[in-house]
């Protein structure tokens, strides 16, 4: 049995995490199970000199750095669309509507094009408008 802890697999996973992909998507195509990934992360966290110098420790550090970098950058338009897709799969009608209309990609007549899905979400929030009318 060959090890899946190859340099290529580690590079693909770290690159996908750095790009903001969810862990399930980062593992796609690598043949690495979620439980295996977490096992690698645990091995890299052992508090010993031997573990600190291991490939597992370097992998864990690279994963944590990639995650920290993503947190500092905030959500991109691609991130938001991914979140909207997840919400739509879970039954959010508003998320479905935004994904179908994609108002941030179109120029509505007589209106300024929203810069991002965030702006489109605010524009399309009928419930918020209704609440604003109540006094």
Image (tube, helix red, strand yellow):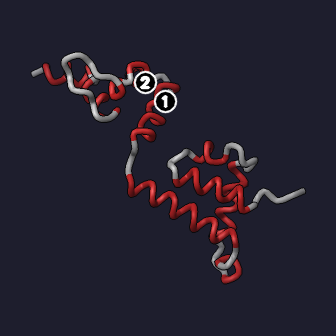
Quarter of the figure with residue 39? bottom right
Q: Earlier in the sequence, mark 2 or mark 1?
A: 1
Residue 28 against residue 38 in the figure, above or below: above
- What's the distance in space between the residues labelled 2 and 1, CA to CA? 7 Å
Given residues 105 and 35, the one toward you in this image is: 105
Question: SS for tag 1?
Answer: helix
Who's the residue at 51% across and 64% down the image?
Answer: 65
Q: Which mark is residue 99?
A: 2
Residue 21 against residue 1 in the figure, above or below: above
The answer to the question of whether label 2 and label 1 lie on touching residues, with beta carbons closer than 8 A, is yes
Given residues 9 and 109, the one toward you in this image is: 109
Q: Position of residue 115 (x, y in %)?
A: 29, 34
Quarter of the figure with residue 93? top left
Q: For mark 1, what is the residue?
A: 85
Q: Residues within 10 Å of mark 1 (few under 14, many from 20)?
A: some
Q: Position of residue 89 (x, y in %)?
A: 52, 25
């Amino acid at each position: 049995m060959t090890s899946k802890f190859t340099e290529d697999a580690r590079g693909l996973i770290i690159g996908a995490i750095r790009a903001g992909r969810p862990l399930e998507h980062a593992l796609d195509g690598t043949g690495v199970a979620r439980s295996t990934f977490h096992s690698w992360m645990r091995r890299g966290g052992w508090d010993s000199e031997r573990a600190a110098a291991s490939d597992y420790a370097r992998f864990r550090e690279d994963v944590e750095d990639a995650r920290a970098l993503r947190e500092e950058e905030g959500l991109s338009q691609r991130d938001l669309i991914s979140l909207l897709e997840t919400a739509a799969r879970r039954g959010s009608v508003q998320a479905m509507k935004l994904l179908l209309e994609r108002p941030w990609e179109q120029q509505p007549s007589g209106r300024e094009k929203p810069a991002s899905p965030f702006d489109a979400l605010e524009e399309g929030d009928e419930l918020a408008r209704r609440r604003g009318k109540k006094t």
